[in-house]
C-alpha cells in the first residue's frame, strides 16, 4: 500500500526552487518510493546496481547525458565523484528540479554535496514513518505496537513478522553498509556495542563506559558511534546551555532513529513483551523525541531540539528553540504512564523558572487518551490523536 508522506509537498517546493534536491535518511525509510511517486516523469537510476554504477564511474558524462531532462539518482553516496559532473551539467543547463539525489549515509554524502553542489541543492531528510503518517493511512498506532514495530514502511505493509524484518534490517546494515564504510574486524564486539546502545536510550552518552563494557578502546567506541550516527541508526540529542551561572550537563542524550529497532536489539520479540518491560519508559521517551524530530524534518526544517539538565538534576526532556517566536523556548516532559498527575509537570515549572520569560510553551506528553491544559501546561496524550 502507498502511504502519503508529509515531506512530499516540501520536496516539490524544493524542486521548484533548486536545480538539485538531495534527500537523505535511513535505508528503507521510503526515499525511493517518495521520489518516484513525487516525480513520476523522471527516469530512475540506482547506483546500488553494479552495472549502473560501473557506467557512471567509467564515463560519468555519458551516464548523465542519458537524462536530458533530469533523473532520480538513488544511493548517490556510492559514487560521490559523480556530484562534480552533476554540478557542471546543471550550471550549463539552467533550470530547477533537474536531479533528485538520494543517499543513506549522511556524513559521507554531505561532505561531497557541500563541496560540489553548494548553493545548487536543497537538503531534506526522510525518516521512518511518523505516528501521524500511520494514522493518516488508517494503520494501527497503539502505543505498544509503535514501540514494537517502529516506523519502517515495509513493516507496516505487512506480510513479514516484525521481528524477522528488523533482524534482517540489522543484518543487512552490518553486512552491507558497514563493510562499505570501514573494515570491521570486530563484528561480535560491534554487535554488542549496538545492543548496549539500545539498552541506554534516553540516557546520557558515556563512550568510556560503553567501551569498557564491550572491551574496546575509547577511540574505537567513538568511531563506532560516528558510524551509527552517520548511517541514521542513532540520534544524539545535544544539551541546551547558555551562560546561566549553573553547571550544566554537556554530554548528548542517546536515542535511536527507529524505536522498533531499539526494541528488537534489547530482545523484545513480541508486542506483549512491552507491557511490563523495564525499558518501556525509556523506549516511550525515544518514540516521542523522534516524533518531534520527524515533525520538523517533515516540514523541511532542521530540528531546533535540545535537552536541559543541570548538576542538581533539574531537567527537561526537550527544549525547543524559537517555539512561538524568535528567542522563545518550549519545554517538553515525557512519561509513559496513561494517567496524568499534576506533579508530573514539576520539572517543567522548575526549568521554566530557571530560564525565565523566554519560555512561552510547556508540554507534557504521556501515554494516555486525553489532551487538555492544566496549570499552564499542555498535556498531550499520545493516543488522543497526535500532538504538535
Image (cartoon, rainbow, N blue to C red):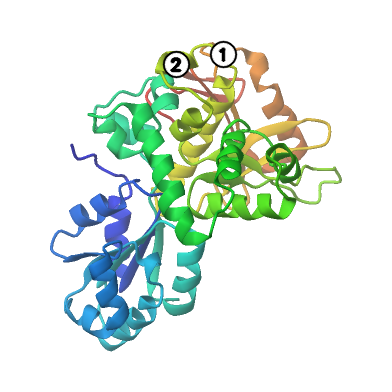
- Compared to residue 368, the image places residue 9 above or below, namely below
Q: Which corner quadrant of the image does residue 198 belong to? A: top right
Name the disc covering residue 95, or none.
none
Please give the name of the residue rendered at 28% of the width and 51% of the height, measured from the top-left corner.
Answer: 8
Q: Label 2's element?
A: loop
Q: Earlier in the sequence, mark 2 or mark 1?
A: 1
Name the disc covering residue 370, or none.
2
Q: Which corner quadrant of the image does residue 337 belong to? A: top right
Please give the name of the residue rendered at 24% of the width and 69% of the height, measured from the top-left corner.
Answer: 52
Q: Are marks 2 and 1 in contact (CB under 8 Å)?
A: yes
Please give the name of the residue rendered at 39% of the width and 46% of the height, measured from the top-left corner.
Answer: 172
From this viewpoint, which residue is outermost toward the front? 185
Residue nearest the viewer, comparing 254 with 90: 254
Residue 82 is left or right of residue 55, and the answer is: right
- Compared to residue 280, the image places residue 188 above or below, namely below
CA neighbours of label 1 inside 10 A, class few (<14), some (14 to 19), many (20+): some
Name the disc covering residue 340, or none.
1
Please give the name of the residue rendered at 75% of the width and 47% of the height, measured from the top-left corner.
Answer: 250
Q: Is residue 182 visible?
A: yes
Q: Label 1's element?
A: loop
Residue nearest the viewer, comparing 203 with 93: 203
From this viewpoint, which residue is outermost toward the left? 41
CA neighbours of label 2 inside 10 A, class few (<14), some (14 to 19), many (20+): some
Task: Give the CA distance from mark 2 to mark 1.
Answer: 9 Å
Residue 256 is left or right of residue 70, and the answer is: right
Q: Is residue 320 visible?
A: no
Percent x, y of residue 187: 55, 46
Residue 214 is left or right of residue 273, and the answer is: right
Percent x, y of residue 74: 29, 62
Amino acid at each position: 500500500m502507498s502511504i502519503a508522506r508529509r515531506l512530499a509537498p516540501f520536496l516539490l517546493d524544493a524542486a521548484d526552487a533548486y536545480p538539485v534536491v538531495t534527500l537523505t535518511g535511513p535505508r528503507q525509510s521510503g526515499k525511493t518510493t517518495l521520489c518516484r511517486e513525487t516525480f513520476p516523469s523522471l527516469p530512475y537510476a540506482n547506483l546500488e546496481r553494479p552495472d549502473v554504477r560501473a557506467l557512471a564511474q567509467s564515463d560519468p558524462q555519458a551516464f548523465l547525458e542519458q537524462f536530458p531532462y533530469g533523473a532520480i539518482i538513488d544511493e548517490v553516496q556510492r559514487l560521490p565523484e559523480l556530484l562534480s559532473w552533476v554540478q557542471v551539467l546543471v550550471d550549463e543547463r539552467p533550470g530547477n528540479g533537474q536531479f533528485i539525489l538520494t543517499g543513506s549515509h549522511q556524513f559521507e554524502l554531505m561532505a561531497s554535496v557541500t563541496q560540489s553542489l553548494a548553493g545548487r541543492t536543497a537538503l531534506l531528510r526522510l525518516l521512518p514513518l511518523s505516528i501521524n503518517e500511520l494514522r493518516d493511512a488508517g494503520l494501527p498506532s497503539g502505543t505498544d505496537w509503535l514501540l514494537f514495530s517502529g516506523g519502517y514502511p515495509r513493516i507496516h505493509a505487512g506480510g513479514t513478522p516484525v521481528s524477522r524484518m528488523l533482524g534482517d534490517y540489522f543484518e543487512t546494515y552490518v553486512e552491507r553498509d558497514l563493510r562499505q564504510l570501514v573494515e570491521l574486524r570486530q563484528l561480535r564486539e560491534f554487535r554488542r556495542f549496538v545492543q548496549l546502545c539500545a539498552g541506554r536510550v534516553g540516557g546520557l552518552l558515556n563512550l568510556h563506559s560503553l567501551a569498557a563494557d564491550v572491551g574496546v578502546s575509547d577511540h574505537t567506541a567513538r568511531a563506532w558511534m560516528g558510524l551509527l550516527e552517520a548511517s541514521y541508526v542513532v540520534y544524539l540529542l545535544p544539551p541546551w546551555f547558555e551562560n546561566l551561572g549553573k553547571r550544566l550537563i554537556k554530554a548528548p542524550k542517546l536515542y535511536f532513529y527507529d524505536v522498533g529497532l531499539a526494541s528488537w536489539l534489547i530482545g523484545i520479540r513480541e508486542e506483549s513483551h512491552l507491557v511490563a518491560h523495564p525499558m518501556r519508559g525509556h523506549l516511550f521517551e525515544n518514540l516521542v523525541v523522534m516524533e518531534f524530530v520527524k515533525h520538523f524534518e517533515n516540514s523541511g526544517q532542521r530540528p531546533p531540539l535540545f535537552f536541559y539538565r543541570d548538576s542538581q538534576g533539574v531537567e527537561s526532556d526537550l527544549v525547543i528553540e524559537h517555539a512561538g517566536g524568535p528567542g522563545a523556548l518550549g519545554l517538553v516532559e515525557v512519561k509513559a504512564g496513561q494517567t496524568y498527575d499534576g506533579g508530573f509537570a514539576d520539572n517543567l515549572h522548575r526549568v521554566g523558572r530557571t530560564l525565565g520569560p523566554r519560555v512561552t510553551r510547556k508540554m507534557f506528553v504521556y501515554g494516555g487518551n486525553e489532551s487538555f491544559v492544566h496549570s499552564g501546561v499542555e498535556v498531550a496524550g499520545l493516543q488522543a490523536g497526535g500532538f504538535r
